[in-house]
Amino acid sequence: MSLPEKGNPPSIPDSVKASADNVSAEVFSLSASVAEMEAMAKKLRRHIITMIGKAGSGHPGGSLSSVEILTALYFKVMRHKPSDHQWADRDRFILSKGHAAPLLYATLAECGYLPVAELATLRQMDSRLQGHTDRTITPGVEMSAGALGQGLSFGLGAALAGRLNGQDYRVYVLLGDGECDEGQVWEAAMASTHFKIDSLVAIVDNNGQQIDGWNRDVMNLDPFPGKWRAFGWEVIEVDGHDLTQLIQAFGEAEKVKGQPTVIIAHTIKGKGVSFMENNPDFHGKAPNAIEVEIALKELE
Amino acid sequence: METAVSVREAYGRTLLELGMENPDIVVLDADLSRSTMTRFFARQFPERFFDCGIAEQNMVGVAAGLAASGKIPFASTFAVFVPGRCFDQVRMSIAQPQLNVKLVTSHGGISVGEDGTSHQSIEDLALIGSLPGFNVIVPADAIETVQAVKAAAESYGPFYIRLCRPKVAPVFGEDYRFKLGKAATMRQGGDATIIAIGLMVKEALEAAQNLEREGIYCRVLNMSTLKPIDEAAIIKAAAETGAIVTAEEHLEHGGLGSAVARMVSQNQPVPMVLVALKDTYAKSGKPAELLERYGLTAKDIEQGVRSAIKRK
């Protein structure tokens, strides 16, 4: 096992490794190399397809496009304890684009927050895995999301609390690009700069599409990086499917002082499944049994 | 008559006091700290005060994030803007996760006065009261405001406290003790019960006094905790007095009257009259003129009581 670059404390302490009865061994091996994280990314994609296929509804496109972002955060960058999801000093991951819940659940399960077998209960009655995230019932879920545009404000609040307490945790908020149509995102962007908060990192899953089609046709966001710069944010652009670039960007963000950082991750909606890639039909539609079979074959 | 006291100033001073006692208390405002009186806290504890500018949606979200990391945020602005401007944010960021956020708003009701319709909050209690698990308090005077704010700080969970703009003559003595979820009996009587909140408690007491001259004896309940409402006190009043009149500075839809009617109709049906705004917006004017024009005075309550008693 190799420790995250920042060294202390390790992303998942040994005590947790021993107590997590799930797949913590894999978690640790994945933090060792990019190749192993790539394998985890593929595994998460398989979970997403299987879960949404079984549920018969859900949002595969925007879950698949964010896979490497969560892989980098949960298996390399963040300090967190699957055995203690309320650990006060944990780095916080806030999924603002709540429809990517299946990806978050799969990631949490692979970290040891939930049994992997529970993933099969997605969207069913009495499941802890709701259609969109619910912080009251799912260990490791920081925010009840699904109503877009609210996560960056929530993340700013969490970051301000940490600063007031003298804690050094960092807060990562994942937004969709379509989500940035919401005015609240820009209220939060303005406030984050005003409060000079540098423990807050926004990541935009910039897959270029939203439900009604391409962003540029539905509601043009250009100049997108320029907007963030104008709001006073440090902007880093990366290939959102390149784990090395992502990990490097998170490291760079830690060096930025006195202002927040946004990582604009250029991604492909539906990434990894040929017939879902760049296909807005699969924003909020589950694959049927045959499509699940084809997708899983592609993800072998 | 005793001198009227500002409920907003009472709030501001109480926040300052709470801030001195508890370092986890933080305060947010949306560019109205001079009106909501959060400025007292802001001056004393600038590092724990966040003016979010004219951006209520973000303010509510930031408050939720602070609460999720252990802080006790009080967020204030006018009642028209929270919850009106940011209902979905209050719903998903605070109510659904039952976070420990205290929304304390001023300028509730039409007694805002000259600023007119845009600033008169007449729907806020319906909106906030519809959210599962939200505690809703409308204090009747400055003394109750102080205690309600302290009670909110001490109890975990989401709270909405609605204050009015005008100064209010005290209806309670210094020995009054606010209890969350408990109605305060202001006056005993067996012919009818007047249940009131906020500014209307004073009007209810005046009405009861006037009716006594006609030989009509009214019980008066201050139902400052609108949610969770004191169901037992309402049912008891219905059973013992046989007629109920509610009085509030809010639309009759979804406010105090609706909540009381829900209890009464299902448990102890008796004639009721709702003294409230009738499906209309108010206009600019002096507070007293507006309350008279829109039927929110002691006289209107008296009329309501007579009408309810007739239908017994």
Image (spheres, coloured by chain):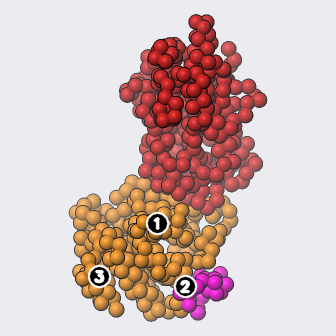
Q: Residue at x 52, y 53 (%)?
A: B94
Q: Which mark is residue B298?
A: none
Determine the image quadrant of residue B99. bottom right
The residue at 49%/18% (across/down) is B312
Q: Pinpoint residue A141: horizontal percent, then vertical percent.
A: 52, 68
Q: Same chain, marks 3 and 1?
A: yes
Determine which residue is flagged by label 2: A22
- Left or right of residue A25, residue A271 in this image: left
Residue for badge 3:
A292
Looking at the rendered structure, whether the residues under marks 2 and 3 are on a common chain is answered as yes
Please indicate, yes or no, whether residue B178 appears anywhere in the rendered image.
yes
> Considering the image in quadrants, where does the N terminus of chain A appear?
bottom right
| Position of residue A275 in the picture relative to residue B288 (left or right) | left
Alpha carbon distance from label 2 to label 3: 25 Å
Which color is chain A depicted in? orange
Q: Amino acid at mark 3?
A: Val
Front residue of A188 and A83? A83
Q: Which chain is red?
A: B
Q: Which residues are magenta?
A: A1-25
Closest to the camera, between mark 3 and mark 1, is 1
Secondary element type, mark 2: loop
Mark 3 or 1, nearer chain start: 1
- Answer whether residue A22 is magenta in the image: yes
Marks 2 and 1 close (CB-CB < 8 Å): no
Q: What is the chain letter for disc 3?
A: A
Give the foreground label among 2 and 1.
1
Distance Cα–Cα, label 3 vs label 1: 25 Å
Q: Which of pointers 2 and 3 lies earlier in the amino acid sequence? A: 2
